[in-house]
Amino acid sequence: MADKLIIAGTIKEALQARCPDAVFLAGGTEINRLNSSVAAGTLISLKKIGKLHGIRKDGDKVWIGACTTFQEAVESPDVPVWFREACRLMASRTKRNMATVGGNTAILRDDSYLVPALLAARAIVVYTEKSGKNEECCVCRYLDMRKAGKLGDALILRIGIDPDRKVLLKRYANTAMSHSVMNLAYGFDPDGKGISIGAALKNTGLFKLRSAEELIAADPEVSEETIMEWARKFEAKIPTDMFGSEEYKRYLLGTTIVKFIADARKEVLA
Amino acid sequence: MKDQYRLVEFNLNGKDVSCMVDCRASLTDMLRNDYRLTSVKKGCEVGECGACNVLIDGECFNSCIYLAVWARGKKIRTLESLLGPNGELSDIQQAFVDETAVQCGFCTPGFVMTAVEILESGKVYTDDELRKLLSGHLCRCTGYENILRAVKKTMYKRNGLEWKEDN
Amino acid sequence: MINCIINGKKRSIDIGPCARLRELLLKNGNFAVRDSDDAEGFCGSDTVLLDGIPVFSNLVLAGEAEGCEIRTPDSLGNSMNLTVVQQALIDAGVVQSAYNAPAAALLMTWLFETNPDPSREDVKDVLSGIFIRDAGYEQYYLAAELIKEKLKYGEYKTKIAPEFRPHLKSVGKNKPKIDAPQLVSGERAFVEDYVDSDTCYMVVLRSPYAHAYVNKIDTSKAEALPGVIKVITAYNCPDVTYMSAGQGNPEPSPHDRKLLNKKVRHVGDRVAAIVAETLEEAIEARNLIEVEYEPLPAVFTVEEAMAEGAPLVHNGYVQYNAGAPADLDEYNAKLSGDEREGHVLYQFPLHGDILHNVAASNHGGIGDVDKAFAESDAVVEATYQTSQIQHTPLETHICFSKMENGRLIIYASTQVPYHVRRIVSWVTGLSENKIHVIKTRVGGGYGSKQDILVEDLTGYASFVTGRPVLYHNTREEEFIANSTRHPMKVYVKMGGNKDGQITAIYMKVDANTGPYGNHALTVPMNSCSKTLPLFKCDNMKYDLTIYYTNTPPAGAYQGYGTPKGTYGLMMAMRELADKLGVDYKDMVLKNHVEEGYMLEILRGLGEGREGNVVPVGSCGLRDAVLKGCDMIEWGKRVESDDPDWKIGKGFAMIMQGSGLPGLDHANAITKLEMDGSVIVTSGAADIGTGLDTIIAKVTSDILCLPMELITVLSGDTDSGAFDTGSYASSGTFFSGNAAVVAANNLKEKILDEAAYQLGEKVEDMELRWPGEVHSKKTDAVLSYYQIIHTATSGTGRGHLIAPGSFTTGASSVPYGAHFAQVAVNIRTGEIKVQKFYALQDAGTPINPEAALCQMYGASLKSIGHSLYENMILDEKGVCVNATMTDYGVPMITEQPDDFKAVLIDVNDPDGPFGAKSISEIACNGAAPAIGNAIYDACGVWLRSWPMNSEKLLRALGKIN
């Protein structure tokens, strides 16, 4: 465990405290947990930074402060239903009282609750690095940069989502409290176009499933077999492990997207 | 208030230890509360009864009227240090048992520690001298005779003297 | 220094900012904020309110609480002054083993403070972060209703549970569990609450290998560390061979281990125990121990264990205390006899063969199955595999021990205080009078605390160091170094005729006992002895073989072997019914036993000796089946709107026992105190089930005395009298009956004394409420106070004390049937239990509301076993999912929406006031009921646990 705790009162203080041995601490459900994926000597607590809290509507976006807890989001009437549902995927209410939207995004776990939904929603991440200048990019860009080893020190300030965007969710886990074997989200515009699929595949990683999106964009009537075939060949390395066999996971991936396509079609028609 | 607590480093029953103590605390309190050495009994708390006696650098003291902070750098021994590696009683403790010198037992640890000081001096004392040496202890149960006998027998034994019943 | 407000009071606590908030609260004395998961954020035992919001205090840093307001369960009422919420939890019966009941009470309080009219969904939501293993969640919904009513109307409107036996005042009535106020309010109750402040800590160095010799252990660096008091290894521990099961002595399990062995037999096996002044020092010292292992090839499954030339888990030599075979020397000559192996000592023959990794075996049957199969209209056969399952009690195994005046005092969280005392006596060499076992309240046992898994080592450590020693399992240790459900392979062959008559049953059971033989024979035996006697069938045969392997150890688990046998038999029966074209319900009704049917099959199924052949006694089986079929609308298909979801129904007959006739033994001593109140000192071990309350209730009705005037002291080996312990569903039947005998004996003494004092005849005396003797002849009345006062006066005849002992050859079997309606998604393989109905004949339910909770809890637990729970070992024998999150216990989210427990009213002639056992049996029905429902829904059989989506998709041909 860490041996130093800094309670930051402002974003500036938080950024100044950042050093190689330090990490930002938000809800604590990951960092303070047994077998945490994060180890650091210094923790910089963000909870007291007022600017990281709150949900507000601004133009065509809903902005969710990074330190908004899952439960605050669940209870907010300003947040679209799919986002509340994504937060509810964290089954434990007590944990939802603690875990934050920014924390869950930044930690990028391969069983992430929110990242697939944010990818599907084409959500915007507003962050700042040491310079203190606010930057923004879409979640998929954020994910790519993080995968490339960049933005590790960035502090997420808020997440912006488009309330008109439709997102379908499907999470597979042994029990509701278990780590998910797969958490998928399928986003589209009200007209059915602009498809974006986000995936958290346990022991594989987080993905925006571009190749699947392209198949669907190219042929809205794409056959079940084509999608299943795509899933069988999807380029990521999917291991056989305690969560299931590779074949099982690829099957679930494919069949869930097939179901998403059908459900999305129904929703657009409705 | 800032100086109310002080770090005291000392040797307790053979081990170097350190402890933050309230400057007002007695050695009895520190030994009982911080080290749970329950052989150190609180009898009168005014240095009259000897139930709290411990050895400080080999000399027996009433720990109730000795400030904990004075223990700095000292070697403190309590009854607990007398036990063997598997909890065996020492000769002087066994003698107390054998001579029925223990009744309610509250004064016993203090008596034993004074006895240790006597025994470790290596000297052989007369009955009168022993009585005087043990006079700092109060015992309401035994009437002292058996205690005297226990100490005396052990003293004889340790000094290779033959014990006779009319000694 | 952290400044915060705890329960309304400003506090400054001297603790570092990176410590956990829970540690801060412990420093402040809020010990009811407990830890069940080593800060995993799962079980919720550490829940507190931080600035009015429920959080896991283990996941908050102390420094983050600076300036905050914290509320802990201590802010609610104490046991003398309970709040409405606490009282409702007690009245609803959910305060059972109760390790996190204070946390649940805090959550429910918070719920009602923020929402006076919560919906069922709101209750479900607030409890979603709390793990309850014993009582399930269903009665929490009832508690919520009770709270609502009490707050609104000042009284309860809802009936808590059905009541039984109107002529009695306490038995069969909804009267709160007598230990519940202490438990719900978070007062001192568990082992950890009684630890002295000068305690030392013990940790165990565990084997990284599944199978290896420990050739050398260098402890010098560890011992040189300041604060280290003692390192115990196989090279300095007592040379005593025993085993861990708390069973009747001599045990039907091989003695095959020492305190520490020179050969480790599973990943997590004990290598060394380190005792130090602080936990940190003990852990640091553990890291400094150098061990020279000689790894050996290992076996993990029964198939590997039985293979020709398989590595031998025990390869020393075999001894028998009685009944050694004539060729034992020849046999032993074939074993390595290596000194590091130790030896296997059978108390009497269990038909083991360690040369083939067989720990024990048993074979028998009645009639001629081969002939019957040949003559049957149809025969089905299949193999059913069950998985390795952990009990996951909220309180992991813990022991605190110390020496006092040459006596060893052990605070134990155990089901078997007297067996703890005996085994610690063997290990230390102390006679039993020198050992005092104090069973505290137990934070969940379920069979895992029937084994002496930590008390032997902890007790020995205190004995050898003279110091108080605390040992507490981590959650990971609870998984890998404790006991688990035996994985079993159950092959069933069943034949029947077109009229639905079952003609023959054959069971072949291959069980995996892991590295040691505790419960090796008896658990697997239950897979036959508590299943085959459900059937009126003349031809039945079984072959049981129990193998040693290098998996984490198996042991006792609620239901013992029965859930596995029931799984195979009831699934096979459904399959046979289909094959014969008979409805499963009709087949059940045609073949089940009824009162008076002579159970010849039991002859071969004693615990290592000849079994008692008895007729079926009181039996509510048929009622349970018929009523359950009505409730679930058997035969009526349910369709989903979504074509991917298919819905099916299934059920299973179930039975268990009520203790072990001819083996179990219980005692109680009942005393009339000086003011006419009563103290019962029982040998029983209440592990949260309400056994103490049962003892109080039977005593109350016999002595015509209100329960408030009866105190039950139990589980204390100094003050009680011998009891074999709480296992095999014996509590109510044996310990309850012993209390009945003691109370009746005291009643005789009171009547006799009253007659003497009145100068009348004893036959004219009668007991009357509330605690007086009345003369039917003269109408004279003496209160108990008057009687005992005179009896203990200077001229009296003495204190009125009555012992009671209970043994029996009678076998009171609880019966029942569990029903499931299951929805399966044939696209994704997801399986949901929509409805679960548990119907059980428990004889007279002495504590009806607690009985329902036991049924809900055990049913939900076994739903978990059937669908989610499974310890997964990698190729080296390392358990890869030894955390709560990865292992997969059911929480409130998994509980079926329509969940009902129904008590079938049957009066048993031998049970105390007609009572039989209640909880173990409730573990037996879920797997086959769900398995049958899955088949009913989509036509495929899932014949292994856990029945999960991947297996379903495979069975459906969706994946290969």
Image (spheres, rainbow, N blue to C red):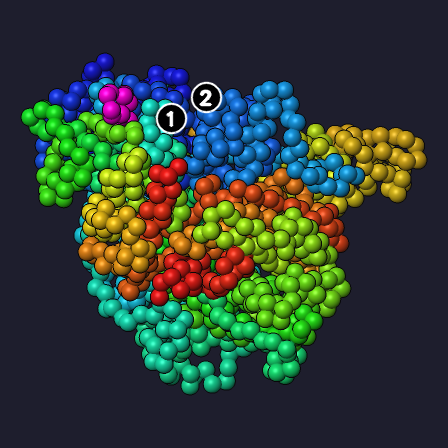
| Residue A161 appears left or right of C467 | left
Residue at position x 27%, y 59% in the image: A229
Residue at position x 55%, y 30% in the image: C144
Looking at the image, can residue C849 be seen? Answer: yes
Tag on residue C10? none
| Location of residue C862 in the rendering, given as x and y in whole percent from the top left corner | 50, 52
On what subunit does the disc labeled 2 rest? C
Depth order, front residue of A51/C394:
A51
Position of the C terminus of chain C by quadrant: bottom left
Q: Amino acid type of disc 1?
A: Glu
Q: Which residue is mark 1?
A: A75
Q: SS at mark 1?
A: helix
Depth order, front residue of C254/C842:
C842
Q: SS at mark 2?
A: helix
Mark 2 surroundings within 10 Å by alpha-carbon count, few (fewer than 14), some (14 through 19), many (20 or more): few
Q: Is residue C334 above or below residue C2?
A: below
Q: Which residues are magenta?
A: A55-72
| Residue B124 appears left or right of C764 | left
| Location of residue C640 in the rendering, given as x and y in whole percent from the top left corner | 51, 48
Whether the magenta-drawn stretch holds residue C845 is answered as no
On what subunit does the disc labeled 1 rest? A
Q: Is residue C162 above or below residue C580?
A: above
Q: Which residue is mark 2?
A: C114
Looking at the image, can residue C64 be seen? Answer: no
Residue at position x 52%, y 39% in the image: C137
